[in-house]
């Protein structure tokens, strides 16, 4: 499968009639139950959280940053963000859709492969700047970092092989310049 045909595959193509994907960052106090309260606000409004990444703030361990993606009506999302911001332990929440940000994600792909297939898999990995992080007798683990579209196309090229396991981090982002996320 060529890279051009992979780009045209349903995995890599977005549906023009689907709801827009929004990326939200939320700074919260690092306390038990905060994630559940935030998820409940989304659930009550019928919004599905498609990816969620949470990490402690490096500058102050009392806080954590949540980055989530979800699809749906922008007006409803605006109401959700207002409700989330009112929650105890939430410092602020922003929808970064359309903003000048750097975003990326990570995927680990475990592939069962014979020695005869490795050369082709390694060529695909090299083409997408992916790195083999584990060589087994009958398997490889490949790590790829980049935009979700890049990862989608990479995975579509690997569909011809036996993918045993796939783990994706979900999108993370940071605003460009000196503005904080």
Image (spheres, rainbow, N blue to C red):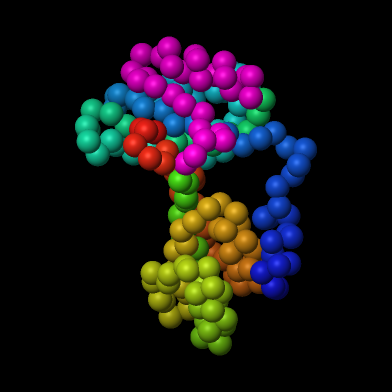
From the viewer's perspective, tell me whether residue 65 is left or right of residue 121: left
Q: 98 and 163: which one is in front?
A: 98
Residue 89 lies within the magenta run:
yes
Residue 79, image x, y percentages: 57, 15
In the current view of this chain or complex, which residue is farthest to the front?
177
Question: Residue 24 vs residue 71: left or right?
Answer: left
Judge whether 9 appears above or below 21 on screen: below
* Position of 26 relative to 8 (above/below): above
In the rendered image, the residue lying farthest to the right is 17
Place of residue 91 in the rendered image (x, y in percent of width and height, measured from the top left): 35, 20
Depth check: 69 or 174 in front? 174
Judged from this view, the residue extending furthest toward the bottom is 116
Residue drawn at point x = 43 percent, y = 80 percent: 137
Kindly identify the residue that appears in the image at 36 percent across and 14 percent down: 88
Q: Is residue 10 left or right of residue 47?
A: right
Residue in view at x 61 percent, y 72 percent = 161
| Whether residue 118 can be seen here | yes
List x then y, in percent, for residue 40: 51, 21
Tally of marks: 0
Q: Quadrant of the N terminus?
A: bottom right
Q: Which residues are magenta?
A: 74-101
Camera sees residue 113: no
In the rendered image, the quadrant that contains the C terminus is: top left
- Asked if residue 91 is among those painted magenta in the image, a careful observer would answer yes
Q: Is residue 73 above or below residue 132?
A: above
Quarter-wise, where is residue 159 in the image? bottom right
Going 56% across and 34% down the picture, which residue do you hit? 97
Q: Position of residue 116 (x, y in %)?
A: 56, 87
In screen coordinates, is 86 left or right of 121? Answer: left
């Amino acid at each position: 499968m060529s890279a051009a045909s992979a780009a045209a595959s349903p995995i890599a193509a977005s549906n023009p009639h689907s709801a827009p994907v929004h990326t939200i960052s939320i700074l919260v106090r690092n306390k038990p139950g905060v994630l559940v309260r935030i998820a409940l606000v989304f659930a009550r409004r019928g919004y599905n959280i498609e990816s969620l990444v949470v990490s402690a703030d490096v500058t102050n361990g009392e806080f954590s940053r949540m980055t989530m993606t979800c699809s749906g009506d922008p007006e409803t999302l605006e109401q959700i963000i207002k409700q989330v911001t009112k929650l105890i332990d939430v410092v602020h929440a922003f929808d970064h859709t359309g903003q000048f940000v750097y975003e990326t994600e990570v995927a680990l792909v475990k592939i069962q492969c014979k020695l005869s297939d490795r050369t082709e898999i390694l060529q695909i990995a090299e083409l997408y700047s992916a790195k083999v992080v584990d060589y087994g007798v009958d398997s490889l683990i490949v790590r790829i970092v980049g935009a979700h579209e890049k990862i989608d196309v990479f995975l579509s090229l690997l569909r011809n092989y036996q993918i045993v396991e796939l783990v994706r981090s979900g999108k993370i982002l940071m605003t460009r310049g000196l503005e904080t996320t």
